Amino acid sequence: MATGQLFSRNTQALFYNYKQLPIQRMLDFDFLCGRETPSVAGIINPGSEGFQKLFFGQQEIAIPVHSTIEAACAAHPTADVFINFASFRSAAASSLSALKQPTIRVVAIIAEGVPELDTKQLIAYARANNKVVIGPATVGGIQAGAFKIGDTAGTIDNIIHCKLYRPGSVGFVSKSGGMSNELYNSIARVTDGIYEGIAIGGDVFPGSTLSDHVLRFNNIPQVKMMVVLGELGGRDEYSLVEALKEGKVTKPVVAWVSGTCARLFKSEVQFGHAGAKSGGEMESAQAKNQALKEAGAVVPTSYESFEDAIKETYDKLVKEGNITEVKEFTPPPIPEDLSIAIRNGKVRAPTHIVSTISDDRGEEPCYAGVPMSSIIEQGFGVGDVICLLWFKRSLPRYCTQFIEICIILCADHGPCVSGAHNAIVTARAGKDLVSCLVSGLLTIGPRFGGAVDDAARYFKDACDRSLTPYEFVESMKKKGIRVPGIGHRIKSRDNKDKRVELLQKFARTHFPSVKYIEYAVQVEDYTLTKANNLVLNVDGAIGSLFLDLLAGSGMFTKQEIDEIVDIGYLNGLFVLARSIGLIGHTFDQKRLKQPLYRHPWEDVLYTK
């Protein structure tokens, strides 16, 4: 066990099992104390490497992440404190591994419930190799104005209130981490504050004892008095009694053992810590307090008078000239995190993304304000979900059925169309699903599947302006624009697209109005007088029928309908539908284990 000071303003630690909040609290404490270098040199996350971004004051820094303890110690040879936030299941193994590293001098084990046999082995190894174990079941420790472990002393506000940003004259050791915060506050009220504080942990076998740290404090010149808070259960306090009796402790010790209320209970009481359970009269709080008092420690009559006893002892040392009052100063303010400042109403910050279609902040996701559970309970289909996420409203059943019919009819059109061909070639090149899907989708455009929006746009404009089919087609011809939604490479007057017929049949049966599809059919009648293959294709049918759906439902304004067409909603329907087929072709090629595709020479015209 070390015989003097454990930490300094230059101490650096390795943090095992990344936890953002305690590390950030350590860095904020560093900044508060005016340290030049962060106290966390590196992070160990088994199986991970890279870095974690945190703040050192206003500066954002990158702290290295290592996958093993050995790698971290090799990379940061000056870091001699190991802060272990592993669970109780792995804390012992990782702590022992750290103790075996020549660069590690102090190990703090935060986890509760570490098996007692494992803890005994750690203690034995540490003592044999002159190393220090703090814990298990500890919050850690702190040297005021220099270094702190993890969450020790809590928030920055509490640290400032307890004057922990600069050193005082009191050495403090306790079993309880929670009570440490209480005592830091009490000590700061009646003294110049602590110099070093340690919570040894509440397990039955702590890695270091109360007397271990009192003896250390006795060797630190800056520590003028010690405050000890023990608890019923175990016999750790008696080692301090022996040290006092043997004259090993020459500085004043103010001590209290909590748990005196245990005698009020008729049966044995187990308090919060594993070790806080009296196993006989000697382990009672009253017996320990009496023994400490007889050995020379200042022991109050109750916990309520503990602070007064600390004050009397401190004032006596000041009066005797043993303590020089610390000169106070105002520590630098810690920059507040933006999220906290926003939550507290201190700043206004613009958002970077606006979303109106879904919200995942509550107990369940909502689509356009409709909870997921309601969508399932009401038996909504894919068409209903599309309406919620695309149009932000529920539409009548015939509308959602039409959308689903469009998806079914447009899901695939065989392996020979450009989109499927691209997806097949990409799949046979061994690419992943997303790459195959995207390669097929990228072919969608004015010549393949992407004419739905243009068909709707031109048919709507012509119909709304009451142009005759002749006027519409001829005006497009003069502009050099092919009529979107008209024409097919295979289908003709005598072999019309069955999909177009099915869509028209559904609309004429269910839609309140079919004004736009009627206009499209009239245009088809005129274009067929020019060529046998200038039929209304599926793009034109979907485009015109979607106009009828939007206008006939009575749920969209004219401005909304124009916006839907301009943005590209209708092409989105084709993209969504055709993705099903493209994925299918990709899986088909992979299932068949098809080799790399190479286009045959005989199908290429080589010319100059």
Image (tube, grey):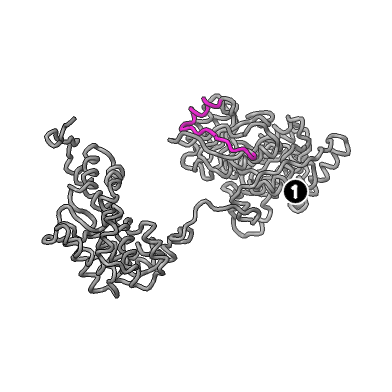
In the rendered structure, does residue 4 fall within the stretch colored magenta?
no
Please provide percent x and percent y for residue 240: 69, 37
Q: Secondary structure at mark 1?
A: helix
In this image, 44 relative to 442: left or right?
right
Q: Which residue is mark 1?
A: 186
- In the figure, 379 relative to 223: above or below? below
Q: Nearer the viewer, residue 398 or 261?
A: 398
- The N terminus: image quadrant: top right
In this image, 469 relative to 395: left or right?
left
Would residue 121 be seen by someone viewing this image from the given angle?
Answer: no
Question: Neighbour class for label 1 at 10 Å: few (<14), some, many (≥20)?
Answer: some
Q: Nearer the viewer, residue 317 or 462?
A: 462
Would residue 489 be seen by someone viewing this image from the given angle?
Answer: yes
- The C terminus: image quadrant: top left
Please provide percent x and percent y for residue 50: 48, 34
Q: Quadrant of residue 243?
A: top right
- The stretch of residues the image draws in magenta is 57-76
Please provide percent x and percent y for residue 567: 39, 57
- In the figure, 427 relative to 379: above or below? above
Q: Quadrant of residue 112?
A: top right
- Residue displayed at 87% across by 35% down: 321
Q: Quadrant of residue 20?
A: top right
Q: Nearer the viewer, residue 577 or 280?
A: 577
